[in-house]
Image (cartoon, helix red, strand yellow):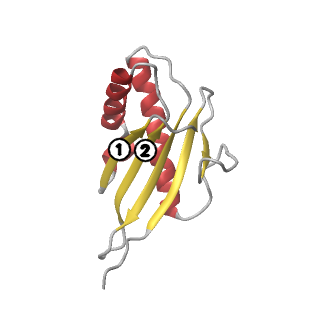
Amino acid sequence: MNTKPKTFGPVIAFHDGSETTRYACDQTSEKSPHPPAGSPVDMLLASLAYCFVKSIEWAAKDHKASLHPFAVKVIGTKALDLPGRVERMDVVIIGELVDDSVVAGQMVKLAKSICTVSNTLNCTVMVSTDPAADD
């Protein structure tokens, strides 16, 4: 029998240049300053999304770059075997971070390396970008 792994999320964290990161479960839902209520895994996804927002902010400072609004979407995939756990988290950085795509790529790489949450997790964390998407 072929089963499809259960997914958690998405949880999306939005950066608009203000001090407050906002959250939603999709691009069109109302954004809240609080992570979506749900399971402990949803909180874990929100923590990873927030950590990437902060890490990108720090990477922008390191590159002396001004950030455009962007979002970080995180989806978790549950392992098929025991013990119950998240086997993989997919992080998508949505929007153009800065005008220079080379600098943006360097910032994403730096953000991945300094994100304490992703570095702590005992699962695969895949990071990709979607610069064309609107947040």
Residue 129 position (above or below residue 56): below
- Give the x, y percent position of residue 82: 30, 76
Which residue is at 59% across, 63% downward? 38
Q: Secondary structure at mark 1?
A: strand
Residue at image mark 1:
127
Amino acid type of the residue tagged 2 in the rendering = Val
For the view shown, which residue lies furthest in the front direction? 132
Q: What is the crowding at mark 1: few (fewer than 14 residues within 10 Å), some, or many (at least 20)?
A: some
Residue 24 position (above or below residue 56): below
Which residue is at 63% across, 27% downward? 18
Q: Which of the 4 image quarters holds residue 21? A: top right
Which residue is at 42% across, 70% downward? 6
Residue at image mark 2:
92
- Give the x, y percent position of residue 99: 45, 19
Q: Nearer the viewer, residue 50 or 105?
A: 105
Which residue is at 37% across, 38% downward? 115
Tag 2–tag 1 contact (CB < 8 Å): yes
Q: Which mark is residue 71?
A: none
Q: Secondary structure at mark 2?
A: strand
Q: Which of the 4 image quarters holds residue 111? A: top left
